[in-house]
Image (spheres, grey):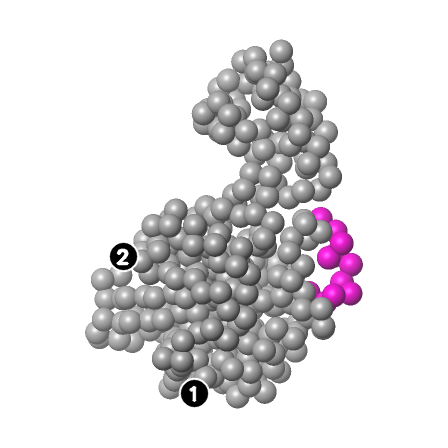
Amino acid sequence: MRTIKDLLSITPIDKTDARVLLGHLLEQSLGWSRSALVSKDQEKLPESLISQWQELEKDRLQGLPVAYLIGKKGFHGIELNVNPSVLIPRPETELLVDLAIEEIKCQIAHSDQVLKLRVLDLGTGSGAIALALANAIRESDQDNLKIEVIGIDASSDAITLAHQNAIALDLSDVVQFIQSNWYTNIPKEWLGSFDLILSNPPYIDPRDPHLHEGDLRFEPRKALTDEHDGLQCIRLILDRCQEFLKRDGLIALEHGYNQAAQVRALLNQAGLSDVESRPDLAGHMRISIGRKAPKTPLANRS
């Protein structure tokens, strides 16, 4: 019989991935915490678990993403259930949440009454952006803020998963999810009611070779590329965003590292003001924003 130490020493997969996968397996099969990787590394493991481990190794060697194999992914301080019907949340998308928090704090600072804000997350997938934002607001314990977040996705499987994540995080009272192809099924009474529109839309050019590499090979293609030029979904979002934004409402879009100038041009064409791009941690411009009929430019707010 083999031990945890044995399995980790001979595994052909990346050692970090191996520890995550084996820790998950030990927790699911034996009820051991992740600390058992160290505290119980000399204990003999049952053959049934070793067989399961070998299957996990095989799947990972074939390239299946770790997040799909364990069914979970951390994002902006929350843990989300994920599966192959949704994109795996990535660190760069956390910048959208940070930007939304910055905008909300700015509005709180300029208000002397209870704020009621409505946020729209287009292409919500697992609900990552919507739920992370709602969780951050909850943890900030703002008595003078009431927030409602709506997540939209065309995929019924994604909406089902997002609902499950909202329930697991106890956020279903402030976050709701609607199956819709962009704005199609959003109630008419919500026209002109959104303070923020956020989106990480499909933006990869269909000719990009990265679509056939790494984790992207296993993620839903419709969530990665528009099968056009990588900007078509952004055009569709911007085409109607002013109908749904409040006066002074902000839209923020994630895009490719080399698309910032094109997205800013599209924001300007859509009649938005205060258009600018924001860098990711590597210095690449990954988010571009615009505002509807601003009262005060974002850059002048404090």
> Real-space Cα distance between discs 2 and 1?
30 Å
- Asked if labels 1 and 2 touch by Cβ distance under 8 angstroms, the answer is no
Q: Residue at x 56, y 12 (%)?
A: 44
- The residue where tag 2 is placed is 141
Q: Residue at x 53, y 72 (%)?
A: 182
Q: Residue at x 61, y 16 (%)?
A: 47
Q: Is residue 210 magenta?
A: yes
The answer to whether residue 17 shows anywhere in this view is yes
In this view of the protein, which residue sits in the foreground, 162 or 201? 162
Characterize the local packing of mark 1: few (<14), some (14-19) or many (20 or more) Cα atoms within 10 angstroms.
Answer: some
Question: In the rendered view, would you say 43 is above or below 27?
Answer: above
Give the x, y percent position of residue 154: 55, 65
* Residue 293, disc: 1
In this view of the protein, which residue sits in the foreground, 70 or 3? 70
Question: In the rendered view, would you say 19 is above or below 83?
Answer: above
- On screen, residue 127 versus residue 257, left or right, reads left
Q: Is residue 130 magenta?
A: no
Amino acid type, callout 1: Ala
Q: Which residues are magenta?
A: 204-214
Amino acid type, callout 2: Asp
* Rendered-image quadrant of the N terminus: top right
* Rendered-image quadrant of the C terminus: bottom left
